[in-house]
Each structure stands twice: as C-alpha cells, then as structure tokens.
Amino acid sequence: MPLKSGRLTRQELAFVDVMAKTGDPTYAAQKAGYSSPQPRGSQNMANPAIQAAVREKEHHTLVADLLPKATRALSRALDTQNPTGVTMKAVEIVMKRAYGEEAGGIGKAPSEMSPDELAAALDKLKSELADRSRPPVIEHDSGVFD
C-alpha cells in the first residue's frame, strides 16, 4: 500500500524495478521480498499508481537505454558492408521514421496526397474521433452491485 504521502513504499519501488525489466508480477513480488509473491504481484499490478510507475520505468529504459543502442546499430548497418537486404531494411526503417510510419499518405502533407489518400486519412480521423467520443466502459463483477 502506498505511503500516506502518496509515494510508493521501498518494497513497491523494488517491485516496480523488477516488473519493468521482466514483465512478471510474481517474480517481481518475490524479488521485492513479499511473503506471498503471487497474490501480491497481482494486487500490485491492480494498483494504478504502481501501473503508472512501471510504465514510466519502462519508458525511461526504452528512451535512455534501448533507443541509443538501436540508433547506433542502425547507423552501423548503414555504414558497413552488409548484404543488400540488411542495408535496405535499415534504409526502410530510417525512411519510415523520417517520413511517416504508414504508407498511403500518412506522414505526407495534405497538399501532397492524392484524393484517395485524403479520403483514407479523413476516414481514419473520423473513426478515431468516434472512438474517443464514446464514454468509457467500466467492467465489474456481476453480483457486486446487486
């Protein structure tokens, strides 16, 4: 349970560190020193504050550790003599990242899109707007409120 100040306990912080690295709540609870790792791992992952801390830790690892390594590896793939397929895959990754992820107009300025690409982009935006305008569904166990 978080401290009254809203911060996580030392044990919860230890859980967050291991959980962000492994994705295994039972193992993380065991490494954090909980006496009943399986239920405590599940309970911790049901806590929104702990979920947020795990996501933040994962994002930090991604940005601070993995992204620089991936960038260096991509640079090496482009700078060295590799089979054509490896080099072209590296080029494809760089181009997609620089000019947009999806083919078919996404990542292009509207003035550069064909009528079909504009229609597809508009449909995608309308669909996203409809999804975001729906009220959230809150699931509950049947019988709890009966």
Image: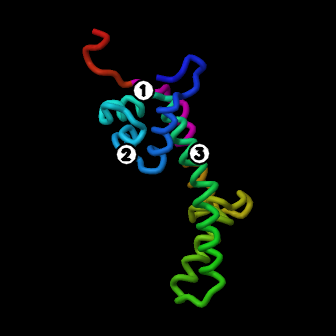
SS category of the residue bearing label 3: helix
Q: Nearer the viewer, residue 30 or 53?
A: 30
Q: Which residue is at a point 37% across and 29% down the rendered structure image?
A: 43
Alpha-carbon span between mark 1 and mark 3 = 22 Å
Residue 137 part of the magenta-drawn span: yes
Colouring:
rainbow
* Region of the chain picked out in magenta, as a range: 126-138
The residues bearing labels 2 and 3 have C-alpha atoms spaced at a distance of 36 Å
Q: Which mark is residue 24?
A: 2
Q: Can residue 146 be seen in this view?
A: yes
1 or 2: tag closer to the N-terminus = 2
Q: Which residue is drawn at 30% across and 31% down?
A: 36
Asked where in the image residue 138 lies, by quadrant, the reply is top left
Left or right placement of residue 145 versus residue 9 in this view: left
- Which one is nearer the viewer's eye here, 61 or 134? 61
The residue that label 1 is drawn on is 137
For the residues marked 1 and 2, what is the alpha-carbon distance in whole angstroms? 27 Å
> Residue visible at 58% across and 22% down?
6
Residue 116 visible from this viewpoint: no
Q: As displayed, is residue 112 above or below residue 10? A: below
In percent of width and height, residue 40 lies at: 35, 31
With respect to residue 128, does 89 lie above or below? below
- Residue that appears at 60% across and 49% down: 60
Badge 2: how crowded within 10 Å, few (<14), some, or many (20+)?
A: some
Q: Which label is found at residue 125? A: 3
Q: What element does badge 2 sit on? A: loop
Q: Which amino acid does label 2 sit on?
A: Asp
Q: Residue flagged by tag 3: what amino acid is it?
A: Leu
User: Judging from the image, what secondary structure is the residue with disc 1 in?
Assistant: loop
What amino acid type should be assigned to the residue bearing mark 1? Val
Q: Which mark is residue 63?
A: none
